[in-house]
Amino acid sequence: MSQEPDLWFDPAKCLIGGHWVEPASGEELPLLNPSTGDRIGSIARGTSADIDAAVAAAETARQGEWGKVTAVERGRILTRLGQLVLERVEHLARIEAIDVGKPLKQARADAVALARYLEFYGGAADKLHGETIPYLDGYTVYTLREPHGVTGHIVPWNYPMQIIGRSVGAALATGNACVLKPAEDACLTALAFADLAKQAGLPDGALNVVPGLGSEAGAALSAHPGVHHVSFTGSVATGSQVQVAAARNVVPVTLELGGKSPQLVFDDADLEAALPFLVNAGIQNAGQTCSASSRILVHRSVQDQVIERMAARYASLRVGPALEDLDVGPLISEKQKTIVGGFLEKGRDLAVAAEGVLQNASDGGNYVKPTLFAGVGADHVLARDEIFGPVQVIIPFDDEDEAIAIANGTDYGLVASVWSRDGARQMRLAKKIRTGQVFINNYGAGGGVELPFGGMGKSGHGREKGFEALYGFTTLKTVAAYHG
Ligand code: NAD
């Protein structure tokens, strides 16, 4: 097996006010490698005391040095940070591989995406401005876009680098001071990122990182009265708790939650072009992707062809250790493996069209064979609930109206794609499908950092990515000056 990467920072510490410190509890949490199940180190068990210190450090930074940094200089710092990330793509990818279980190709793509967010938001930092508003005689009226202040960022384990890039990157670009709580199952690249941010010249306290349990550090951050905006990415259940906690302080919240995203394959679709997207969008990151396409809705007349092609691809999927860089890695944890196993059990009554193949998968790793179920009814639990594992269901439909009803028929509304050569149908469906992003004859559009992203329904609210995120991380002040 390939060599494990060096960690140049101490993973058992928090970064608070520019200093690497032990958590107040003095306690650690285990750092486990999902590919083997082995304990490979420890991380800090941050608690409310560390969150208090981190929020205070962020407040000091925004009222002090960080608050005085100009927009153009914020942009330069982020651009330098992006460059440092780009120079370390391979190293960061290896760290993510042992922490999250991502095959190297996918982990490298995450590191490059992190750099892209920093380039994008670094370049945008000095391009966000207010407006002048024509008003009554004797007045000059204008608006100012100001940072919220201290922003809290609660991040899940599935795409740490990308989610930190889109959320912390946009928050820093607009002058907020950040407190980041990475997931307890995957915080190494968050700590690496924080160390690189120091190297890039980010003033002390502008970014603070407190690893720890969600119920301790996460809950303390979302409920903290010194936090002025909370950005949360994770499950619906936790997101709802975070929103309630933030509501007690009457602060805005961005929620990026789960999904059950469909691809709609019509009888006039280019199946050859669609095939790689149909499968990859479901098994990427072992299906642990909020925008994973876990439902393939197929016109009944082409169902057999789609099943046959997808099944052939599934049978070739190799599942094994992240550092071996196969098609699919392990799931993040034993807990996630149990959850996905429970769903596979619920699919006992369904036809399994194909499965992937395990390769060098040690017993201690959290491996699940990718599984494709065919001919599934839209009401089946596997067609409605988010599984967050490498499992896809093929659901047949007979006409466009039925396809739309099935597509919109879950609690979620994150993304969807339409495969059809009919331009009018493409336009109709783009309007009728209730999701935050709709793709036509593609899926994911390469994940572009420029494209606003977020959900409808229980997939959440607020938009991150693109220029839109800069509005979300600022508040608008109207100044009306009377001069006669
Ligand atoms: P999770 O909700 O359990 O954890 C997410 C984060 O919240 C972690 O940092 C965790 O420590 C923290 N947390 C847990 N309990 C908390 C509490 N009471 N208060 C505050 N913070 C708390 O989710 P997960 O299992 O880490 O991630 C999987 C889920 O995230 C899936 O449902 C997936 O769809 C969703 N997700 C969504 C997106 C998106 O952009 N829409 C991206 C990635 C993941």
Image: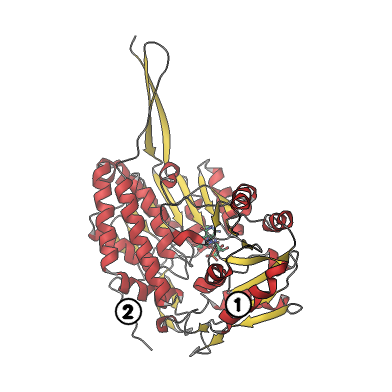
Identify whether 311 is placed above or below 215.
Answer: below
Q: Which colour scheme is used?
A: secondary structure
Q: Residues within 10 Å of mark 2 (few under 14, many from 20)?
A: some
Q: Residue 5 carries which label?
A: 2
Q: Which mark is residue 267?
A: none
Q: In which quarter of the image is the N terminus?
A: bottom left
Quarter of the image for residue 117 reads bottom left
Q: Residue 188: x, y in percent?
A: 38, 70
**C-alpha distance separating marks 2 and 1:** 38 Å
Would residue 211 be visible to someone looking at this image?
no
Identify whether 437 is placed above or below 336.
Answer: above
Going by the numbered disc 2, the residue's amino acid type is: Pro
Q: Specify whether 267 is left or right of 326.
A: right
Q: Which mark is residue 309?
A: 1
Q: Residue 99: x, y in percent?
A: 42, 75
Quarter of the image for residue 113 reads bottom left
Q: Specify whether 185 is left or right of 21.
A: right
Q: Specify whether 201 is left or right of 60.
A: left
Provide the secondary structure element on which disc 2 rests. loop
Going by the numbered disc 1, the residue's amino acid type is: Arg
Q: Residue 11: x, y in percent?
A: 35, 71
Q: Specify whether 287 is left or right of 377.
A: left
Identify whether 447 is placed above or below 450.
Answer: below
Q: Viewer-proximal residue, 204 or 84? A: 84
Would residue 158 be visible to someone looking at this image?
yes
Residue appearing at x 27%, y 58% in the figure:
81
Q: Residue 344: x, y in percent?
A: 67, 77
